[in-house]
Amino acid sequence: MGLTTDLKSSRYATTLIFFVNGLVLGIWATNIPAISKALSLTDGQLGAALSMFAAGTMLMIFLAGSVANKLGSRAAIVLGGILLSISLPLLVMSPSYEVFFAILLFFGICNSVIDISMNTHASIIEEQEGRPLMSWFHAAFSFGGMAGAGVVSLFDAYELSALFNLGFAAVLMLLTTLACAGPLRHLRPAQVTEAQKNKVTIRPSLTLLIVAMLTIMSLFTENSMINWSAKYLTDVASTSTGIAAFAFGGFSFAMAVGRLAGNPLILRHGRDCVLVCSGLLGVAGFALAVLAPAPLTAIAGFMLVGLGLSNMTPILYSKAAQACPQAPSLGLALNGTIGYLGFLVCPPIIGATSDHIGLHYSMLLPLVAMLVVSLVAWKGQLELRTAPKAVAG
């Protein structure tokens, strides 16, 4: 009974960490327009700087996993939460573009520590409880993003500064981390057996490479929402920061709802059908935002995008694992490594395009990405016609 109670407490604490991490990133995302304006950045400069967040994450992704494995996921979560709380106010205190560039790299590194460790912790809890829980944890993250946008909207009504917003986020992240340090159990990933230590090399199949390409499209679109949705509202729809916050908030809410409904939909209609419909929802959402760039219609459009994206990446990760039946973890690793390029290249591409044709029409790029996902899934290119070969070393 004690073990069950401890595991339940750890699950609740992990859920809270996911929620607050989403809230903190929601506050950051909706303050991007204000920070950009304060530093007088062009969209191209902003895009180049924002790519540093993804670069920092990619630099730390393997090291952070090692930290979680050696220290235990609880210690890694606490370390990540403290580092993230330190980095948040620095983002708005940057005296120059060059410093902002470097701090965003540091911010990405800090966030990757808590991101990987909390997902590791969640996966161990899921394994020990013997039931699927990951969708719930990620739904909590999305609800946190919605709450963060709501916080910014509330603070904007009182004309509170971006420094206050990110300072509040930092204090909240720190207090939550310290409060959850006790309930979080000292968990480590399962020890690798001698048989599992044998090196396995996967020769990627065409199917896996196609899945990875579509994951790039999915993460490109998700990053366009995180970094550019609020700015789209301020620059294109000409609204205030408080109203613009609802762009990311609505997107996050739709993501959370879609994730909660994802498993039943997949069980009933199949992954390929849901993937096709997800892409079409994204296309419809961007079309609405571009064709009718008023605040209400743009927010509604971004909510459709959130519904479309909610189950897209999870489905593609499942397909990547299926494409490597001999070593699913290697399929996931390859898909994640390639797919994360979408996060890395999105900010500079959107930013540079916006400098030339405006942010309004730059949103056609993620529209095309969603259309590609839908068309490829509809054509049945993701069927596992051939399995990749595994070579034991």
Image: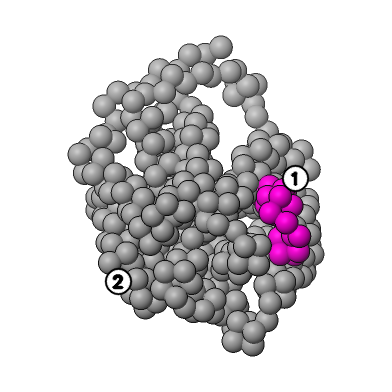
In the image, the segment drawn in magenta is 89-108
Task: Give percent across and percent down for residue 305.
Answer: 36, 61
Residue 101: within the magenta? yes
Task: Give percent across and percent down for residue 383.
Answer: 26, 34
- Looking at numbered disc 2 in the image, what kind of residue is underneath it? Ala
Which residue corresponds to the image point at 50% horizontal and 43% vertical from the top-left?
345
Q: Give the main secondary structure, helix, strand or loop, of the magenta stretch.
A: helix
Between 71 and 232, the one nearer to me in the picture: 232
The quadrant of the rendering that contains the N terminus is bottom right
Between 286 and 25, the one nearer to me in the picture: 286
The quadrant of the rendering that contains the C terminus is top right
* CB within 8 Å, label 1 to label 2: no
Q: Judge whether residue 175 can be spotted in this image.
A: yes
Q: Colour scheme in the image?
A: one colour
Which residue corresponds to the image point at 42% horizontal and 52% vertical from the top-left?
356
As drawn, 121 above or below 393: below
The image's mark for residue 292 is 2
Asked which secondary structure carries label 1, the reply is loop
**Residue under pointer 1:** 72
Task: Give percent across and percent down for residue 258.
Answer: 39, 63
